[in-house]
Amino acid sequence: MQQGSLSKAMTFRPTTLERAYELAKSGSCRTVGDIKVKLQAEGHERVQDRLYGGSLTSALRKLCTAHYIAPEGEDAPAKVADDEDEDA
């Protein structure tokens, strides 16, 4: 396979961390737990290990809170409890 063909054959996939931030900003995830569930469903491995740490969890939680869009007919929660984010 030639070099040009190789680059066309390769597909870009964001890292687990990059995808977590994309999901947090997308408006589709209410909690960090929601992000972890989606990442696992997308085939990302070792999600718990890659999204570990208070600073990272806090940053993702703030993005989820700022960007979450509740589905039609569902009220957006006023505040998400911290324990909902930890071990989903």
Image (cartoon, rainbow, N blue to C red):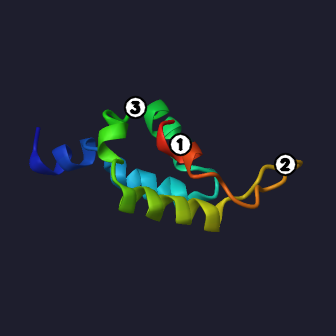
User: Mark 3 — residue?
Assistant: 43
| Residue ID for mark 2 | 74
Residue 34 percent coordinates (x, y): 57, 43
Disc 2 to disc 3: CB gap under 8 Å:
no
Q: Nearer the viewer, residue 8 or 39?
A: 39
**CA neighbours of label 1 inside 10 A, class few (<14), some (14 to 19), many (20+):** some
Measuring from the top left, give residue 42's x and y in whole percent: 45, 35
Disc 1 marks a residue whose amino acid type is Gly
Front residue of this view, candidates 16 and 11: 16
Left or right, 52 with respect to 64, comes to: left
Which residue is located at x 17 percent, y 44 percent? 6
Lower position in the chain sequence, tag 3 or tag 1 = 1
Residue type of the residue flagged with mark 3: Gly
Q: Say which element carries label 3.
A: loop
88 versus 12 height, above or below: above
Instruction: Indicate which label's residue lies in the foreground, 2 or 3.
Output: 2
Disc 1: which residue: 33
**Which quadrant does the N terminus fall into?**
top left
